[in-house]
Image (cartoon, rainbow, N blue to C red):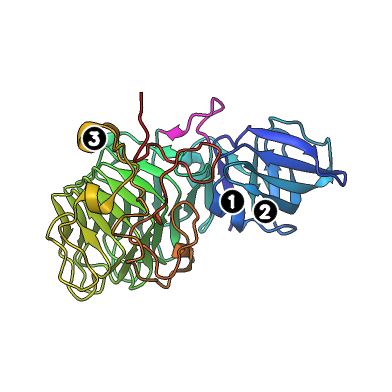
Amino acid sequence: MADLILGEPTNFTVMSDNGAGAQRITFGPWELDWEFFNAINPIAHFIANVTAAQAFPVIAKGGAENLGYWFDVDTPAGTWASGARCTPQRQAAITQFATFFAATLAMANDDYFLVWYADANNRRTWSERILWVDEGASAWGMLSRQQIRLIPSADDMECVLAGGNLNPVVNALEVINLSLASAGENAVRYAAVGAQQWGPGLIVRRCHIRGGVNGVYIDRCDPGTCVIGNCVFTGCLTGVNIQAGAGEVRVHFNAAIDCDVGFDMTPADTEPRNLIASECRVGFQNVGSLNCLNCVATDASLPFSPTNLIMQDARLNLQFFYDHARPGNKAFAYDFRTHHDSVVRGLGVAVGYAPLAWDMDGVLRPAPPSIGPWEPQSTDYAPGARMVRGCTKTAVHP
């Protein structure tokens, strides 16, 4: 497994002495995803400076997402200049590609695409898709909070397509911390061609998926190999579409907002947990009454269960973050995070998949957790704070 650099790593970097003569590199606020920072181990992993074409081992790390993460590396202070384009990675060799097509030609199974800016102008939107056929890798958005976007043309049909014979892949394909907007069929499709070729499965988490016929579409998979978690689906014809040929799929801590159908999950052993379907024409479709637990809908489509809430009002009950100071509460678009007075607070159930112990923003879920991708928070808007809200329940906007 190798980390392949896609595009241009951040150049919002400051170089300094760590106080002991070693080089410290500090990333700008919101310039590195919290989960990838957590995955970097001192000594075992590296900082790659693509400007200088050098990589050195990490010897210490710290900081915060909103203030900027820092790394000390095993080279004397002054080796690198501020403004160099740098990324953490998990091997010493530096491999960089300008396009997904070039990276796919060069990759080996189970590599990771570290997806940075699309060009040297720091454009955050990529105008191409990821296509893995008879092989598979993973894609990780490196900027915090889904800033990296894939918006391919309608001719491309999907943002991410994994298909063919996926048996040569060892680890589940992961799509992490990306915004995906499809003008075609699907944002993400897992389309193994037949029995004995289903591969290790697919994990989609911490993604914001907009539009398209389907947000995530799974044709078939072995039971328990596919996970969709901590994702938001907005304006899709169907947010999550699990076909009858798929085995058990774990669909946990997601929200489908303003979709025609929120969740369509035909297999009887699919495991829907902690889901929100808000203002969809049909929130839940083909969902088994025994498996769909701890979910909320603004319509009556949820199967009956003591743990499910139906016919909830999006404004009064769910309480997404939006401006309450304007008539009709519609002056600004929803933030999709929920206020601490929301009915979803504390009504979830813990699931066995370890990465979902944290919500979409890296907040450790309490016991019991809340329903949806985010743990509810109090209203605030402070760009320097760890939690940032695009709009609030009480602020008066000009």
Cα separation, mark 2 vs mark 1, equals 7 Å
Q: Are the two marked residues, 3 and 2, in contact with CB atoms closer than 8 angstroms?
A: no
Residue beneath the point at 31% across and 60% down: 344
Q: Earlier in the sequence, mark 1 or mark 3?
A: 1
Residue 219 position, x and y percent, is 26, 60
Residue type, mark 2 in image: Gln
Residue beneath the point at 69% across and 45% down: 70
Segment colored magenta? 117-126
Residue beneath the point at 41% across and 57% down: 375
Q: Observer-nearest residue: 379 or 116?
A: 379
Which residue lies under the disc numbered 1?
3
Cα separation, mark 3 vs mark 2, equals 48 Å
Mark 3 vs mark 2, foreground winner is 3
Residue type, mark 1 in image: Asp
Q: Observer-nearest residue: 381 or 225?
A: 381
The residue lying furthest to the right in this view is 21
Query: Which of the image's four quarters has the N terminus?
Result: bottom right
